Image (spheres, rainbow, N blue to C red):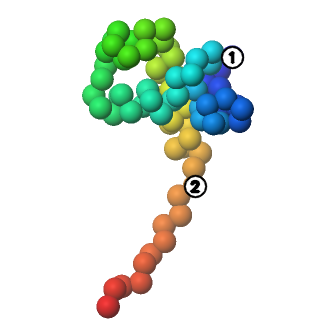
Amino acid sequence: MTRISVRPDFCHGKPCIQGTRIQVAQVIDLIAAGKSFHNITADYFPDLTDNDIRACLEFARDLIQNEDIHVVEEAPRA
């Protein structure tokens, strides 16, 4: 069972931690801001577990790994 849920009728279709309205992006933003797992659970989302936070990271990683990147070269500016 996955910890991340994506439903079009819930949180505008944004990926959330199962059973919550906590969006994956919110957790990733906190990690990007330098917050530790402990800070995230103690100061922001006390109902989350370390495994929930890891699931957010894994979800983001999977999106990046499965994304095709197409490099487009721009014409030189005059």
Q: Residue furthest bottom?
A: 78
**Residue 13 vs residue 51, the one in the foreground:** 13
Q: Quadrant of residue 38?
A: top left
Label 1, on which residue?
1
Q: Are marks 1 and 2 in contact (CB under 8 Å)?
A: no
The picture places residue 36, in percent across and down from the top left corner, at 31, 19
| Residue drawn where x is 61% and y is 31% of the image | 11
The picture places residue 13, in percent across and down from the top left corner, at 65, 36
Residue 3 shows in this picture: no
Label 2, on which residue?
68
Residue 43 shows in this picture: yes
Task: Give the number of callouts.
Answer: 2
The local secondary structure at tag 1 comes to loop
Q: Residue furthest left?
A: 34
| Residue drawn where x is 36% and y is 85% of the image | 76
The picture places residue 9, in percent across and down from the top left corner, at 72, 32
**Residue 9 vs residue 60, the one in the foreground:** 9
| Residue drawn where x is 35% and y is 9% of the image | 42
The local secondary structure at tag 2 comes to loop
On screen, residue 63 above or below 76: above
Say which quadrant the C terminus sits in.
bottom left
Residue type at numbered disc 1: Met
Q: Quadrant of residue 37?
A: top left
**Residue 18 vs residue 76, the one in the foreground:** 18
The picture places residue 19, in percent across and down from the top left corner, at 63, 15
**Is tag 1's residue or tag 2's residue first in the polypeptide sequence?**
1
Separation of marks 1 and 2 at Cα, in angstroms = 27 Å
On screen, residue 1 above or below 24: above
With 78 as the anchor, is 58 left or right in this view? right
**Residue 18 vs residue 55, the one in the foreground:** 18
Badge 1 crowding class, 10 Å Cα cut-off, few under 14, some 14 to 19, many 20 or more, is few
